[in-house]
Amino acid sequence: MDRISRITRRRLLRNAAALSALPLALKAAPAAAQAPAVIKLPNKIVLKCATIVVEKFPYVDGLRFWKKSIEEKTGGSVEMQIFHSAQLGDERTINEGILAGSIHIGIGAGAWGGFVPAYNVVELPFLIRDLPHSYRLADGKLGERIAAQAEPKGFKVLTYYSTGDQHFQTRSVQIKSLADFAGLKIRVLQNKAVIDGFRTLGAVPAPLPYPEIYTALQQGTVDGTANDLLTVSFGKFYEVAKYFTMSSYLVEPRPVIMSKAYFDGLPADLQAALAATAKESAVYERKVFEERLASAKEDCIKNGMTFLELTDREKWVEKVRPAWAEFAKTVPGAAELVQAVQENA
């Protein structure tokens, strides 16, 4: 066999070997190299998401993360529209709109307790300890039990966003101990669990709508208020309240909700995608919230607020326990939720 024939034969053998190995190489290729599966829907679906918070509040960041994820997974056949700053109404209007079908997604808070009364367990002062504790509860038994109680009321809970932890802000009185709290008139949420809790702690609760807080502090009709750091920074409460006492008296997981009937009517693969991407968005929203809490504290300090710490937190916890017990006894479904928190203390 001449030299050219031998070279040609070797080349043919090498090519044949390469071709025979190709199927194995393709089979071994990592899944990450493959294009993600796209959920195909026969018709485009538009999901309206509504919240009362302003655009720079972390809820909106979470919803935008979710929007990007679900629109990518469906190749654009699902469009998520986000309405913030109460563009579609107040919280009760949004909740009612979800049940009526005019709004598809919302974030439950105090008014949602009117539909699912036991949810107000998260409004019991000092029951939930801090942000990590709230995440464990929301992603565990407490979250599951709230979701189960919501379904007969017509709601589907997909995940839980964070609203940070709430603390005390006062005009002129420093709160460092439980004794300092006695007799102070404190603006609170318009929520029975909070009102009863503050009364048990010795304060005089003054339920006022959020827009009235600044003026009430400015005019001295209240001695203080109780809010999260972002609210204080955004609302410039540091202009009318000198002291900020870190207490984490409330740490509320907030349910991301849809109509159960609407959700159940969606294709199964879309239901699964919505649930998965909702949970991913909650992880992102919580991270954004924590990052902004740090910058909000810096803003308050820069603008003259003095930060204090409770020196006797355990006394507050012991003092308010009767309010927890009364809530568990009198609100249907509340006992199992209080138990779920205490089991994961």
Image (cartoon, rainbow, N blue to C red):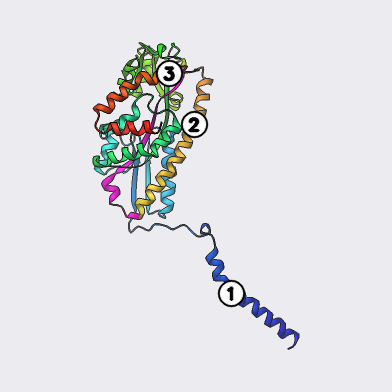
Count numbered badges in the picture: 3
Q: Residue furthest front?
A: 343
Query: According to the image, label 1 marks what residue?
Result: 19
Dot 3: what SS? Answer: strand
Q: Which residues are magenta?
A: 244-268
At label 2, counting other C-alpha atoms closer than 10 Å, the crowd grade (few under 14, some 14-19, many 20 or more) is: some
Expressed as whole percent of the image width and height from the top left, the position of residue 269 reads 36, 55
Residue type pointed to by label 2: Arg
The magenta stretch spans residue 261: yes
Query: According to the image, label 3 marks what residue?
Result: 169
Expressed as whole percent of the image width and height from the top left, the position of residue 247 reads 44, 22
Residue drawn at x 51%, y 28% is: 294
Foreground residue, 336 or 110? 336
Mark drawn on residue 292: 2
Determine which quarter of the picture holds residue 320. Answer: top left
Residue type pointed to by label 3: Gln
User: Does the CB distance between marks 3 and 2 fall below 8 Å?
Assistant: no
Vertical arrangement, residue 162 with respect to residue 14, above or below: above
Viewer can see residue 100: yes
Residue drawn at x 48%, y 37% is: 287
Among numbered discs 2 and 1, the one appearing first in the sequence: 1
